[in-house]
Image (cartoon, rainbow, N blue to C red):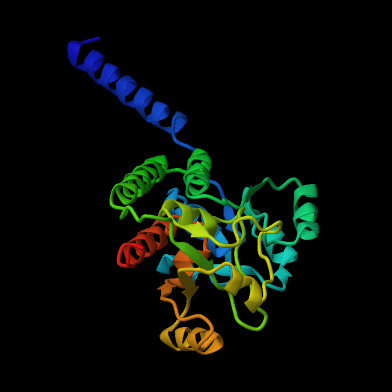
Amino acid sequence: MNSTSKFMRSLIGFLLFFTLASHAFTAPKYRVISLSPANTELAYAAGLEDSLVAVSAYSDYPKAAQKLEQVADWQGMNIERIVALKPDLILAWRGGNPQRPLDQLASLGIPIIYFDPQTIDGVISSLEELSQYSPHPEIAKKNIMQMRSRLEAQKNTLVNHEKPKRLFIQLGTQPLFSAGDQTIQNDVVKTCGAQNIFENSAVQWPQVSREQVLTRKPDAIIMTGSPEQEKTVKAFWHSQLNIPIIRLNEDWFHRAGPRIINATEQLCAQLNTLPNK
C-alpha cells in the first residue's frame, strides 16, 4: 500500500469519527406542542423553533408562531389532533390548562412539562429547563444572559423614593380584580422597588371592592390595554381616586415569558418619573 492510499484512509477515518461525534453530541429533535402563549414564547427563546409542531390560541409572538397549527384555546384542547401530531413533549400551563385532558395525554405516554413561573427568576429557570430539550441550547444561553443583564441594569437605575410607591394592579372594572403575592405581576412591582397593595392577599387573583382599594391609598394604578381602556379606568374611579395611571403593554405584563423583562423596564421607567414623596 502506497503512502497516498494510507493518507486517504486516515483522512476518511478522521472525518468519519468527527461526523459520528457531532451526531452523538447533538440534542435529539423533539416534536413539541405548546399549550399557552407564554410557553410558546419560552420555547422560541430556548431555541425550539424548529421543534414546535403546534401551539395554543393567541400564540402570536414571535410572528413565526402564527403560522403553526392551534390545538388549544380557553375552551380546552383538541386531544385527537394532539395525539395525531405525535408529540415527544408537551409544554403545559399549570395555572391555565385543564388537568383532565393532560392526564389523558400523560396516560398515553406523552411527556408533559408544566410551566407557571411566578417570578422573573422563575422565567429564567424555565428557559434553563427547556434548553435541555433544545437542538440549539446556545440560543437559550444567550437569552438567559441577556435577561439577567437587563434585570441587573434595572436594579441599578431605580430612583430611591423616600417610601416605596404603593401600586394597585387593576384587572378589569366589572368585576374588579387584582394580583396577589404569588404572581409574576407582583414580582415585577417588587423588582421596581414598589409595593403591591394586595400583596398580602390570601389568593392569587383577589376580587376586590372600591372601598378596599381606597382604604389602601395607592400612589398609582397599573393597568394594561389601549388608551381607550385607560379612559375607562379613569371614568371608573372618577373623583374618588385622582392618581397617576401607569399603562403597560398587555402581553409583556401578563405573559410569564421572556418579554416580562420588557414590562419590568417599562414599569421601572414610569415609576422613576413619579414625585418623590
* Image side of residue 173 versus residue 75, left or right: left
Q: Is residue 101 above or below residue 215?
A: above
Viewer-nearest residue: 44 or 179: 179
* Image side of residue 54 versus residue 229, left or right: right
For image coordinates 52% across by 42% down, the residue present is 133
Residue 20 place in picture, x, y as percent: 42, 28
Q: Quadrant of residue 98?
A: bottom right
Viewer-nearest residue: 234 or 6: 234
Residue 208 place in picture, x, y as percent: 67, 72
Q: Is residue 170 above or below residue 39?
A: below
Q: Is residue 2 above or below residue 220?
A: above
For image coordinates 59% across by 78% down, the residue present is 172
* Image side of residue 87 versus residue 228, left or right: right
Q: Quadrant of residue 252?
A: bottom left
Residue 209 place in picture, x, y as percent: 67, 76
Quadrant (top left/top right/bottom left/bottom right) for the N terminus: top left
Viewer-nearest residue: 6 or 116: 116
Residue 53 place in picture, x, y as percent: 55, 60
How many discs mark residues in the rendered view?
Answer: 0
Quadrant (top left/top right/bottom left/bottom right) for the C terminus: bottom left
